[in-house]
Image: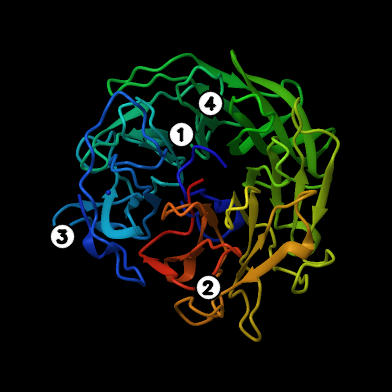
Amino acid sequence: MIQSSLLPRARASRGRLPRLRAASVAAGVVLAACPAPLLLAAPASAAAAKHYDDFNGDGYRDLAVPYAYSGMDDGSVSFSGGAVLVTFGGPKGLTTKTQLVHQDSPGVPGAGEENDQFGGALASADLDRDGYADLVVGNPSEESGTTPVGSVTVVWGSAKGLKGGTAVPRKGGGAFGAFGRDIATGDFNGDGRPDIATVNAGDVLLYRGGFTKSGGLGKVTAYDRAGQGWYADSLAAGKVTGDGKTDLVAVGVRGVGGTFRTEAWFLKGDGAGLTSGPAKVIDSKKQHERLDVAIGDFDRNGYGDIAVGNPYASGSRGSVTLWYGASAGPGSRSLAFSQSTAGIPGASEANDEFGASLAAGDADGDGYADLAVGVPGEAAGEKSASGAAYVFRGGSGGLKGSRSVVFDKTLPGVAGGTVAHDYFGYDLRLRDLDRDGRADLAVSAPSENTVRILPGAKGGVTGAGSAVLRETGADLPE
């Protein structure tokens, strides 16, 4: 996936927890290995930040996730309504330096309220191209008066981390529109400036760059599948067609006659913004909200491939639909796989929820994108819903069951014992946090408010050298 911060996607409709997705809280993160000291931030220049998630401009990637609690951010300032925990990177990966950001932080618009979900969706990019990545935060239950309408806030990067913020104006939709329910960033029109895509009342909204701290932005356009009873709620950005522009995939519900079904809708990036493309049916008989979607070039043919998880399939056994990319966008080549597919270890069982979360990245450094799949309902022996994560290694021909490996907390080197109802794998992301050319796997275990970081390696993801982030929420950014 492209241009989105590693963690959160609120999926309250699934009846459990929001997804994974900084005043300073030194005790907010504990690493299993001794971290290297954080380097001083380099001065900003006119050039955009090298990494879309380097908030302090020091050249190292940082990690933003939802914070698990409301309370005191430094022993003196109280907050409520959600927060984002940022862990800063260093030469050996993530460090112990953290920052907590919420709506009661200096310069951040709005005020934290009990029913807010600040951090319910996260994305990032250097929106003002000053050398520091900026964090885009969704709060889908933000109230206007007493009416829930949602909000999106840009929190600006600086040499000292995230500082101040600007509200993104809401377009269209009214009560319960859940503005900011999901967010993605990328250069959709190819003008060299990052754009923001989000959702409101079922429409896809595109906010074009450039952005300024004073509230400046380009043209805003709403996209809908007119006359098709369409309601979008999940987004993923990536390069599908190979033309250099970022493309967008929206997953949502479409009304067909008196019934509803779940589809993925492709929107091609172009000079004007986005152009409506084909749709792929994910479930022809039922509507599902907040399905996860990831984009990666799994067969290394120059075109991004689209993966959509459906944890509800077959009695919540779950499945993943893979929709392969091409020069004009995704075409007729597709497949669906599950734990019943040949070569995939384990057994498909009711309530496993295979495909509850997805992430794409190159974990072994071979040039092929790999796909991580969360299975939070997977049992470990007698311990129900302890959870697991699969990594499918990309290669010639794309993803295959024979190139898949399963991980859980029994893996040697992974801290913490296997516990029932940990939901390990509820959310996950693949991102190169230590600059070794291989994506590391971040996996949330929401029942213990932790995220495990499993390093990428030549042979793929490994438990050796794993780290633990504590006090986190369930969701991870893109």
Q: Determine the CA span between mark 4 and mark 1.
A: 8 Å
- For the question of whether residue 464 can be seen, the reply is yes
The answer to the question of whether label 4 and label 1 lie on touching residues, with beta carbons closer than 8 A, is: yes
* Residue 433 percent location from the top left of the image: 43, 54
Q: Earlier in the sequence, mark 3 or mark 1?
A: 3
Q: Nearer the viewer, mark 2 or mark 1?
A: 2
Q: Earlier in the sequence, mark 2 or mark 1?
A: 1
Q: Farthest residue in the left direction?
A: 76
Q: Determine the CA span between mark 2 and mark 4.
A: 37 Å
Secondary structure beneath dot 4 equals: loop
Q: Nearer the viewer, mark 4 or mark 3?
A: 3
The answer to the question of whether label 2 and label 3 lie on touching residues, with beta carbons closer than 8 A, is: no
The answer to the question of whether label 2 and label 4 lie on touching residues, with beta carbons closer than 8 A, is: no
Residue type of the residue flagged with mark 3: Gly
Q: Which mark is residue 75?
A: 3
The residue wearing badge 4 is 173
Q: Residue at x 56, y 78 (%)?
A: 411
Residue type of the residue flagged with mark 1: Val
**Dot 1: few (<14), some (14–19), or many (≥20) neighbours within 10 Å?**
many
* Residue 373 percent location from the top left of the image: 65, 59
